[in-house]
Image (cartoon, rainbow, N blue to C red):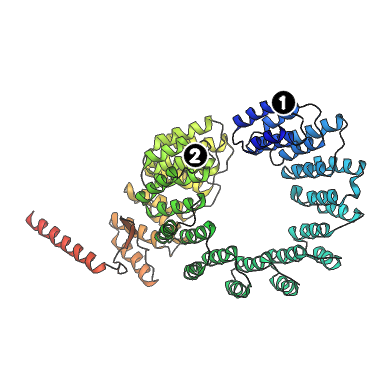
Amino acid sequence: MDQTLLKILQNCRSLKQVKQTHLQIFIHGLQNSSFLLPKLLTLSSELGFLHYACSIFQNSCCPNVVAYNTLIKCCIGKTREDALRAYDQMKTFGIGPNSYTFTFLLRCFESFEALEDGKLVHGDVVKLGFGSSVFVQNTLLDFYAKCAGGDLNSARQVFDEMPERDVVSWNSMIAAYMARGRIEPAMRLFHSAPQKNIVTWNSIVSGLSKAGNMELAHSVFEKMPERNEVSWNSLVTSYMRLGNMSSAQCLFEQMPKKTVVSWTAMVSGYTTIGDLESARSIFSQMPVRNVVSWNAMIAGYVHNHMFDQALSVFRKMLLDGKCRPDQSTLISVLSACTHLGSLEHGKWIDSYIKGNKFDMSVPLGNALIDMFAKCGDVENAKAVFDKMDKRCIITWTTMVSGLAVNGWCREALALFETMCLEGLKPDDVIFIAVLSACTHGGLVEEGKRIYNQMEQEFDIKPRIEHYGCMVDLLGRAGKLEEAIKFVENMHLEPNAVIWASLLSSCKIHGNGDLLESVTRQIMEQEPTNPSYLTLVSNLSASIGQWKDVLTYRLVMRQQGIEKVPGCSSIQMGNEIDEFLSHDTRHEERKEIYGVLNCLNEQVATLSDGV
């Protein structure tokens, strides 16, 4: 019967099934079975129901050391309190711990950086005679090395006092020194180690590489008696991290066996330095690709602002059909849709997510909200927001900002208030979004209240961005004198953006009195910025100061300054076409300009008729 119940347990996939099987175990009097009880505890924990595992354990009669160890193991990364409670109960009932007890306890405390709890267990290790166990001592050494940033003195003391050491002991101590950048003691241990395996050599190469000592790292690498994939990839990725792709490429070509990890690393390395041509060449040569490889290529295009190419690679991934996109893929593709303003593509991704039953993780939900909001589809952005089971501060910020930029300014403020009522503490970034909403909506009094709330209630010190929002808010409302006083009372030196905001407000309200002083501030800080020079020139023209207009435009010509033209885009089917002013890059430019000329002639004819 116990074997039958064990098979049933192994097929359980829900808490309801576990409870039903637990009842059968209880009915047959097998709740203390030496292998059924640990399996029941482990399965409940793996399904995410540790509380049920604890209740099973508490209701069992006379659990043995294996059951206690299993429960403590289930607590790793989840709760240190339950692990301590189980250990204390174990000692109370006189059940002697074994090596696994201490190993699981220390792993649990390490996951919570509970250094003091680990020290108490260390005392029990010594008292109960486990000081001679290499297995326990290695775990203790590793605990001190990793817990709370690394207590190297305690780790070294454990290492020095070990009556017996194995290669794991030496590797752990060497790795601990390397992780903290202590190169010299690590190298001394390395040279004095009685035996070295490939892990020992890899620890040294990896540590030296991370410290930026590539010459010594390469020297150790050349002396290795054997190398594995980790050895090669460690050195290759370190060269890439330093931007030395020529050395990385040279090593890559020497690799006796190139795995998909190695190929993918090279793709990522080239995209990081912006060499998309080389990245695509490596990607095309890959004998086998996994989802990480596709993600590296797609993300590389996104990070280098080549959004249409990112969508093109995504389409090829779907057509290839060998790798299913994951959440990282979809987040990158949604970012490309957002930057291109391609709502049609974004809606297709949304349908793909629903059709393939992807879990709506917080990052994926945030990306969807951002895409819909920036493409102007506020209703769908709100729908995604409302369906999310979990939200972080970025979720709220994205939704507040999305409402604001689409003119739903009071709704943005109401959402912010809802967030505060739910007990989530706002950060400085969301206040920028909320103040921007006030600016877009001309909500001056609300903006002042929120700015004061930021400082007084949440003790957030204003950044230049917050100041910029307030100056823009006051300036757009025509409160120029108040805006000037606000700038004078700032604890930060106003930058050109602040002065340009004031300048724009002067233009909106036709106030030429402030032109000279504000212009002087801008020209002192950023005399060659084409956007600001254009703004000053346009403002001068709007109030009839043509002499100043000519002066500023002459300065721009003499310095060879040109304002970067804006870019427009339109989606036709699956393609995104981009256009610049006087653009000659488009493949169908002759036909496009032909249509434009035809339209111009028709407009001229209609004007003459009027």
Separation of marks 1 and 2 at Cα, in angstroms: 52 Å
Callout 1 environment at 10 Å: few (<14), some (14 to 19), or many (20+)? few
Q: Secondary structure at mark 1?
A: loop
Q: Position of residue 547 (x, y in %)?
A: 30, 63
Q: Amino acid at mark 2?
A: Trp
> What kind of element bears circle 2?
helix
Q: Is residue 12 left or right of residue 94?
A: left
Q: Nearer the viewer, residue 492 or 437?
A: 437
Point 49% across, 53% down: residue = 324
Is 569 left, or right, of 126 in this rendering? left
- In this rendered view, identify the residue nearer to me: 339 or 54: 54
Residue 247, above or below 34: below
* Badge nearest the viewer, 1 or 2: 1
Q: Which mark is residue 396?
A: 2
Is residue 592 among the parts visible in the rendering? yes
Residue 28 - label:
1
Q: Is residue 421 above or below residue 274?
A: above
Q: Residue at the top extreme?
A: 27
In terms of image quadrants, where is residue 40?
top right
Residue type at the position of mark 1: His
- Tag of residue 52: none
